Image: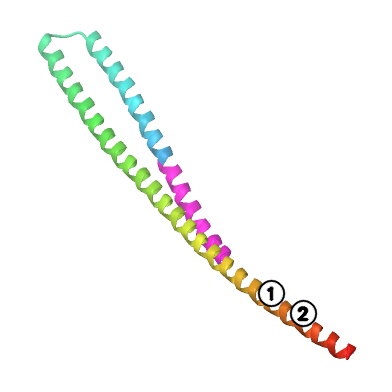
Amino acid sequence: AVREELEELRPKVEALQAEAEAKERARARLEEERNRLKLTNQELEEELRAAQGDDHAMAAAYRRLQQRVAEMDQRHHAQEKEWTYVVKETRRMCEMEVETLKHRSALALETKNREIRRFQLELEQILTAAAQMHSVNQTLVMA
């Protein structure tokens, strides 16, 4: 019964672990995207510095660029925070599931040990009774 219960819960734990791994991969992709955005930002800043024009146009372009970069960075941080929470929550759920399985297994093992001790006592009683009957039979045969 415990083994069946463990086998029933195993796919659930594996699914949760797979989900956690998928979310970790998504977080890694977000990190790669952030690095790519930083590189794009650097390239845009270099283009801005290289651009020809009056100071006013350059200042306006630079402010637009800064705003765009800040917005991209905010989006990235929000996504990263969300994925971090999802990964952490999934791991917490997996750990709880594992603890539940450990507890159930310990209870089942304890129950089986009690059952084995009870069977041992019954067997000892049967063997004692058989030995007594054998002794009585020997006595009767000799008499």
What residue sits right under mark 1 in the picture? 124
6, 77: nearer the viewer:
6
Circle 1 or circle 2, nearest the eye: 2
Dot 1 falls on a residue whose secondary structure is helix
Residue 24: where, in percent of width, then height?
A: 41, 39
- Name the disc covering residue 131, or none: 2
Q: Is residue 98 found left or right of 134 in the rendered image?
A: left
Q: Is residue 89 above or below residue 118?
A: above
Residue type for callout 1: Glu
53, 58: nearer the viewer:
58
Q: Residues within 10 Å of mark 1 (few under 14, many from 20)?
A: few
Instruction: Compare marks 1 and 2 and give the one earlier in the sequence.
Output: 1
Farthest-out residue, left: 56
110, 140: nearer the viewer:
140
Q: Is residue 20 above or below residue 35?
A: below
Identify the residue shown where x is 62% and y is 69%: 116
